[in-house]
Amino acid sequence: MRLLFAGFLACQTFNSLADVELDRIVAVVENDIIMQSELELKLRTVVGQMREQGIQLPPSNVLETQILERMILMKIQLQKAEETGIRVDDETLNRTISNIAAGNNVSLSQFKDILEKDGFSYEKFRENMREEIIISRLRQRQVDNRISITNKEIDNALANLEFQGKTETEYLLQHILISLPEAPTPDEEEQALLVATKVLEDLNTGLDFATMATTISDGQRALEGGDLGWRKKNEIPTIFSTQIATMEKGDISDLIKSSSGFHIVKLADVRSSEKHMITQTNARHILIKVDELTTADDAWVKLEQLRIRIEGGDDFAKLAKANSDDKLSAAQGGDLGWSSPGRLVPQFEKVMNQLEIDEISQPFETQFGWHILQVLGRREHDDTENARREKASETIRRRKSEEAHQNWLRHLRDEAYVEYRLNEN
């Protein structure tokens, strides 16, 4: 629980008068500012997270600069969101926080108490969550919604995996980026190359990759030790894939140049994934819709009468054809065919999963109206091929999104007016 809340420590309020008196501006970002107090709170947050994860801390001045840069980038994104009219209302915010509390098996009241007990301001926590949602929506609008995936791309990705014989292989990657500005001068490029070369030399002498990432990397996952997580071959950014294909567990790549800068990748681990089996259910139902002529009570009574008739020996299929408002399935005697998990609406699927084979449900409601249903059968189904295509689509989208997001952030940062005052007395 404590680790879950660590990311929000930056929202904690100052109680020390001395802190307020010593506060000063450390950066100007367009028409906004970042205060020393904000930076110090964020610094405490990140230090707490890194210690929880067992990551060695870089020098304090290096960590402070990285955190300030991350805060600047957040300010720029929030300003862009405001310009484009992105807002998060209190109802959405309250629902999100309630879901967080429920996900940790506590009530909202208990959640507030835990925050306060751990030294967090609940109101500041709310505003931090609001900013996170705003930035997520901004990325969705500016980056993710503009990405398209074709069947040809999916086919090519699967064909490449088959050719490599690594369709079930996943890779755990770590990443270091020495960034370049959007239009670097020769001197800037040369300086970045010198830094990247020195980092690679240090890594090859045995220095810890995660520590080096937190100390020097400009990548989005720097403060997580450069951890990019487990990925299949087609999830790996294109610029890394060629080198990864020839690397063994524990290997560190040569310098990889891109428009973003110089990259170094470590193949931390390799594993094989398993066949994707799912339980499919064959069910049939009768639907009665609620409208101006049929109330919810009317629908319930009619379905209860039909249920009694079926249990008394009447044919379900004939009654579905004659009475169901779902005309498509009614023509098939109410039969919905074999359904995979997640295909049907949650309320319907929940009732269906609780029934034994041949059992008929009590009348229940979904967004479509009132139903009774009967389970006809269940089977284990090898869904590997469909899952592979869905996964390929998701991972192609993720790779495109990450590359587009990185370029978009770099463009925002290069275009913004930023004045550093961190080292001013």
Image (spheres, rainbow, N blue to C red):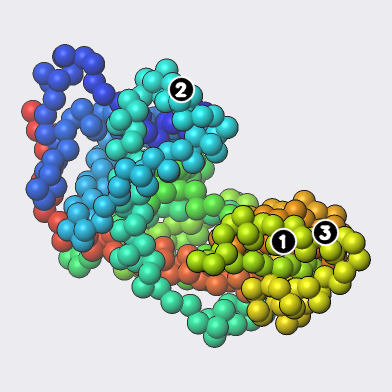
Judged left or right of residue 126, residue 284 is: right
Percent position of residue 265, x then y? 48, 56
Label number found at residue 308: 3
The crowd level at tag 1 (other Cα within 10 Å; few <14, some 14-19, many 20+) is: many
Please name the amino acid that badge 3 sits on: Ile
Q: Could you tell me how far apart the alpha carbons at marks 3 and 2 are, in whole angstroms?
A: 51 Å
Q: Classify mark 1: helix, strand or loop.
A: helix
Residue depicted at 64% across the width and 66% down the height:
288
Residue depicted at 60% across the width and 82% down the height:
155
Q: Could you tell me how far apart the alpha carbons at marks 2 and 1 are, in whole angstroms?
A: 47 Å
Q: Is label 3 in contact with label 1 (beta carbons under 8 Å)?
A: no
Percent position of residue 149, x then y? 48, 77
Please name the amino acid that badge 2 sits on: Ile
Residue labelled with disc 2: 114
Judged left or right of residue 40, residue 100 is: right
Q: Nearer the viewer, residue 54 or 368?
A: 368
Q: Is residue 416 above or below residue 225?
A: below
Earlier residue among tags 3 and 2? 2
Label number found at residue 121: none
Q: Is residue 208 above or below residue 120?
A: below
Q: Is label 2 in contact with label 1 (beta carbons under 8 Å)?
A: no
Q: Classify mark 2: helix, strand or loop.
A: helix
- Where is residue 147, by image quadrant? bottom left
Please name the amino acid that badge 1 sits on: Leu
Earlier residue among tags 2 and 1? 2
Residue labelled with disc 1: 303
Percent position of residue 387, x then y? 67, 69
Residue depicted at 11% across the width and 53% down the height:
417
The crowd level at tag 2 (other Cα within 10 Å; few <14, some 14-19, many 20+) is: some
The crowd level at tag 3 (other Cα within 10 Å; few <14, some 14-19, many 20+) is: few
